Amino acid sequence: MAQTEEFGEELEGFVRRVAELKAARSVPSGDLPTVLDAAIFELDHVADQLWPWYEQLSSTVPAAAVGRRDRQEQQLLRLIFQQLPLPVALTDRETVVRRLNSAATVFTGARPGYTTGRPLAGLLGPADRAAFRSQVAAVARGDGDRSLTVRFQQRPNLPVHTTLTALRPNGEPRPTVLVVLQPTDLRLPPNPPEQRRNPAPALPDLSEATRHAALRDLLDAMTSALLTTPSRDGRTVVERAAGVLHGRFADWVIADTGSGRPVRTTALGPSGADTDAVAAQDPADCPLVVEAARGGSPAPRVRLDQDPDAFGRDATGAPVLVQANVTSLLCVPLARDGVVLGVLTLFRCGARPAFSMAEAQAMDMMSRHIALTVDELPTRRLS
């Protein structure tokens, strides 16, 4: 019993120190490294001291008490994990996210609950994914703690120092990897004392309403463009539709049409991009285009961390998705009455937000409207 009480006192002290660390986020920027070191020290303390101590106590108490206390301690540890001031994630050896605390959700810009079950490497820039996966795998197989600097897609100009350490939760067959994220630029925005004493009232989040309004405006612009197209020739209609989507909805808009072997008719990209190389690409060498034309259903790819060759390679042999720094894409067939008239592919690059499911549905609707506008176009019957 004395050991149990001592453990409880130690845990209470840990919770108090975590609260102090949270309050210390407003210290001057020059003192932040000390605060971050203290936070990492507390994480090590949980992994190296509190958890083994807890396992020892669990083996000496009755089974019923073990189950009850186990649930209580797990709830407490989950609460501590969620309220840590540092962005922290738990992943498996393939970087698939098991848990992401609140600070990490805000830091990565991911929607709450979105990343669970998805690879954390998918949020990184293309150049950092392989190195991050390699280091996480090394830590998971017991090669020791690692650290490296990476960049996230949503913040490509902010280097992030990641610290990786292995954990073996009780009852888990394989170790998990604790990932701590620390921006290398530790400067905080100014926060005057009077602003802290009298914080401004929270403003409503209008981002969702803004996205819905932008999507509605896009649908209206597409409808107007299709209704006012001077010619119902397939190539003219598709080029006009691509012009509406380019820029405001996607960084790249690529159109492939034709019977038998499809032909690339449109390739619109960002200013300064090598659109000629993409225009010269053979659509038959693009697995996503072939899949969309064959299946007749949209193929949204929110994160592109597994298959860099999904859109083939350019004349230099480089994967198009890597060369263009594509982070999200939609590949949509233009189909009418079971007949494929063409395929539209849209890329978003860099820090631009990934396509949402609502945007994918809107693009599916626009593709059907485009197909209805076309009078004649070489076609290929769905197999």
Image (spheres, helix red, strand yellow):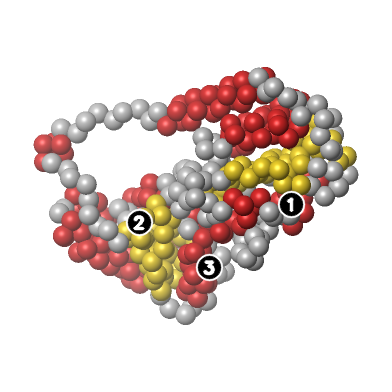
Task: Classify mark 1: helix, strand or loop.
Answer: helix
Circle on res. 226: none
Tell me which residue sits at (66%, 35%) in the image.
Answer: 239
Residue under circle 3?
130
Q: Amino acid at mark 3?
A: Ala
- Gap between marks 2 and 3, in whole Å? 19 Å
Residue 310 drawn at (x, y percent) = 67, 56
In the rendered structure, are the residues bearing label 2 and label 3 in contact, judged by CB atoms less than 8 Å apart? no
Q: Amino acid at mark 1?
A: Pro
Q: Earlier in the sequence, mark 3 or mark 1?
A: 3
Q: Residues within 10 Å of mark 2 (few under 14, many from 20)?
A: some
Comparing 193 with 246, the one in front is 246
- Locate the N terminus by quadrant: bottom left
Comparing 70 with 311, the one in front is 311
Q: Earlier in the sequence, mark 1 or mark 2?
A: 2
Quadrant assignment, res 11: bottom left
Q: Amino acid at mark 2?
A: Leu
Task: Classify mark 2: helix, strand or loop.
Answer: strand
Above or below, 184 relative to 83: below
Circle on res. 158: 2
Residue under circle 1?
283
Tell me which residue sits at (47%, 58%) in the image.
Answer: 124
Task: Classify mark 3: helix, strand or loop.
Answer: helix
Residue 318 drawn at (x, y percent) = 61, 64
Judged left or right of residue 33, residue 120 is: right
Q: Nearer the viewer, mark 3 or mark 1?
A: 1
Residue 353 drawn at (x, y percent) = 49, 43
Residue 252 drawn at (x, y percent) = 58, 44
Tell me which residue sits at (74%, 52%) in the image.
Answer: 283
Q: Nearer the viewer, mark 1 or mark 2?
A: 1
Tell me which residue sits at (84%, 38%) in the image.
Answer: 378
